[in-house]
Image (cartoon, rainbow, N blue to C red):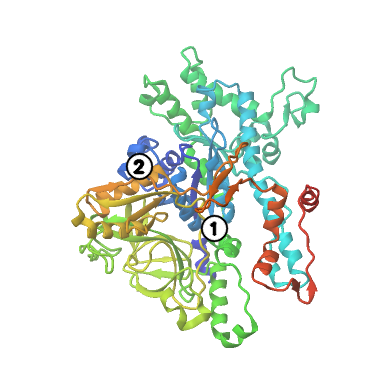
Amino acid sequence: MEGEEAPCRRIRNICILAHVDHGKTTLADHLIAACGGGVLHPKLAGRLRFMDYLDEEQRRAITMKSSSIALHYQGHSINLIDSPGHMDFCSEVSTAARLSDGALVLVDAVEGVHIQTHAVLRQAWVEKLTPCLVLNKIDRLITELKLTPAEAYTRLQRIVHEVNGIVSAFKSEKYLSDVDLLLAAGPGGNEADDAEVEDDVEDTFQPQKGNVAFVCALDGWGFSIGHFAGIYAAKLGASTNALLRGLWGPWYYNTKKMTIVGKKGIEGVSKDPQPMFVQFILKPLFQVYHAALDAEGDKGMLEKVIKSFNLSIPPRELQNKDPKAVLQAVMSRWLPLSDTVLSMVVRCMPDPISAQSFRISRLLPKRDFGLDQVGDNADVIAEVEHVRKCIEVCDSSDSAPCVAFVSKMFAVPYKMLPQRGPNGEILNNQHPGEAGIGESEECFLAFARVFSGVLRAGQRVFVLSALYDPLKGESMQRHVQEAELQSLYLMMGQGLKPVASASAGNVVAIQGLGQYILKSATLSSTKNCWPFSSMMFQVAPTLRVAIEPSDPSDMGTLMKGLRLLNRADPFVEITVSSRGEQVLAAAGEVHLERCIKDLKERFAKVSLEVSPPLVSFKETIEGEDTNVVEKTTPNGRCIVKVHVMKLPDALTKVLEESGDVIGDIVEGRSGKRNGNLDTRDSYDDGNSVTVIKNG
C-alpha cells in the first residue's frame, strides 16, 4: 500500500465558504485561470464567473449550486468546490462540505462577519474540515473607506479576532459536551469512546501560522505574512521565523537597534510607532494604490516595485489609460493571488489520508455491539470494522473495499455529456431517460467522493440508504440496491471529462445511479458496511406553495417534472396536501423562484399556476395586555372565561429538564429507578425550584 499513497498525499479536496457576495466565485475564477489547464483566460477572471454556468446564476450574479473543478498546482491535484453564500441554498453548502477536507472561509474586509459566515463556520466545524481564513476586498479599505494603514490594520485585527471567537465558542461547546459524556459514562464506560476532550486555547486562525490570507480577488492579488517575512529577512538580515512572529500583533521594529520589540520597547524611539504589519506591509500596499489611482500620485512608486521585484509586464499594459488596469497589471504580478491561496491550501490543509483519520468519527461514528449481536454476526462485524478501518486510512489499493459517498444528485442535459470515453470509445449517451424516471432530456449524475478502494466504470456496487443496518440481514432489503456504474467523470465546472477509474481521495461524477438515489447515499462493494452519517442542514424548507398545471391535461407531465426536480435539488420537498394539491416546499423566495423556473423550462415544460405561500404559524409573540376569551354554553347556564399567559421561565426550565419524570408519570410507571427513589431536582442560575415555590 505504501507505493499507492504518494498520489493520495498530493490531493487536496477543498470548498469555498462565505456569506453571499463576499467574493467566492471571483476567487475561484482566478484560481481556475491560473491552474485550470487553460479553460479560463486570465483576463476574464472575475468577470466570467466560470463556476456560475446556469442562466439564473449569471442573471442574479449569485451562486445557486455547488460545483467542482480539478486544478493542478505544483504537482498537487486540488479538487475545488465552489458553494453558494445565499441562505436559500445552504443545502448546497452541506453537500460541498461533506466531500471536502478543508475550507477557504472568505470574509469581506469592509462588511465583516455576517450571519452566513457564522453558519458556514459551524458547517465546517461539524464536518471536521480544516479551515483557512481569506480576508477579501482589501482594496475597499483604501478606495472606498479611505482608511489609513493603521486604521485598516485595526479593522483586519478585529475581523480575525471575531472569527476566532466564533470557532472558540464551537470548541467550548464541544469540550463541555465531551466532558459530560465522560462523566455520564463513568469509569470504563463505552459512551466515552467517541469523546475527544481537547482543551485547546490557541486561536484557530493566526496569520503567523500561515492560515490567513489577505487578498483582493477582483484585482487578482493577495499575500500571507510569510511572503513578506521572506522578503524582509533577506533585506534586514533577520530570521524569517522572528519576522513571522513580529509581522502580526503588537510588535514594532526598532530601527536603531534593528530588533523586534514590544510596545514598551519602542517608547521614546519613535514619535508615532507603527506595528510591523502596518510599517512593512500595509504602507507599501497603500502607496502603490495611491500612486496608481490618484491623479497626483507618485508614478515612480510603480516603477520602483517593478524593478525591485523584477516583474515582467508588457509595456502596453503599463501604458493603459485606465489606471485601474495598470494597477491590476502590477499587483497581480507582484503578489499573484493563485500562488498565495493555493500554496496556503497545500501547506495548511490535509491530504485525504490525514483528513479521513481525523474525520472518521464524523463520517462513520463508532458503534457498540451487544453480546447477542456479536455472537450471531461475528463475521459481519469483522468485515464492517475492516471496511471502517480502510476508510480511516484512505486505503486506495485494489484489494481494499470500495466505498464512496454521494452527497447529491444533479441534472445535466444529455447533449452536454461527453460522446467519447477516456480511451476514445463511443459512449452510449444518446438515449434520453433513465429507467424508472420517465422520458427526459436530463441525465442525473451523482456528485460523489471515493473514501476507500478504487471505483471503476462498469463496476457493480451496493447503494445503501441512511437507514441501512448490515447486522439485520434480509430485513434490510428495501434499504439496499445493487447498481452498475455506467460512466465516471472528472468535473471541470460545467464540463465533464471521462475517466476509467477513481481511487480513494478523489471527487467524481457518476452516471447510472439516477433511478437508485433520491438525494444522497453510500456506495459500497460489500453489503457489510455502515452508511455514512447524515449531512447537517442549517435550516428546513419553510416556504410552501401549491402548484398545478394551467392545463389540467398536463397533470401527468407535472408529476414527472416534480419527481425530477425532487431528485435534482437536495433541499426541495414535494408533498400532497389533504386536499390533494401538489405542495412544493423551498428554503426561501429565491430558491422557490428557481424551482418554479426549473419546472417550467427543464423538468415539466408546462405552464403552471402557483398559489400564494402557504404559511405555517408555529411561533407567536407575547403581549403585555391579553384579552379574556368568554364563551357561553348552548343552554346559557354556564359561562367559561379563558385567559392565556406565558409560563414563568423557571417553571419552563424545570418542565424541560424533567421530561423523563413527567413521561413516567403520564405512562403510569413507578417513580423508582433501579429500586431507588429518583429525587433529582433541576436548577438554573436563578434556582428555578425555589423561585417557583416562592412565587
In this orientation, does residue 294 appear? yes
Residue nearest the viewer, comparing 419 with 380? 380
Q: Which amino acid is tagged 1?
A: Asp
Circle 2: is it few (<14), some (14-19), or many (20+) Cα within 10 Å?
some
Q: Secondary structure at mark 2?
A: helix
Classify 10 Å Cα crowding around label 1: few (below 14), some (14-19), many (20 and above).
Answer: many
Q: Position of residue 242 (x, y in %)?
A: 71, 38
Q: Toward which corner of the image does residue 562 lie, by quadrant?
A: bottom left
| Rendered location of residue 122, percent (x, y) | 58, 49
The answer to whether residue 149 is above or below residue 554 is above
Drawn side of residue 197 relative to residue 462, left or right:
right
Which mark is on residue 57? 2
x then y, percent, for residue 257: 77, 26
From the viewer's side, name the closer residue of 23 and 211: 23
Q: Nearer the viewer, mark 2 or mark 1?
A: 2
- The residue depicted at 49 percent of the width and 31 percent of the height is 310
Give residue 494's position: percent from left, percent from top.
33, 50
**Element under label 1?**
loop
> What label sits on residue 674 in the rendered view?
none
Residue at the image point whose x is 47% and y is 39% from the top:
20
Left or right of 554 on screen, residue 312: right
* Amino acid type, mark 2: Glu
**Which one is earlier in the sequence, the residue at label 2 or at label 1?**
2
* Disc 2 to disc 1, C-alpha distance: 31 Å
**Residue 304 visible, this orientation:** no
The mark found on residue 351 in the picture is: 1
Q: Is residue 440 left or right of residue 312?
A: left
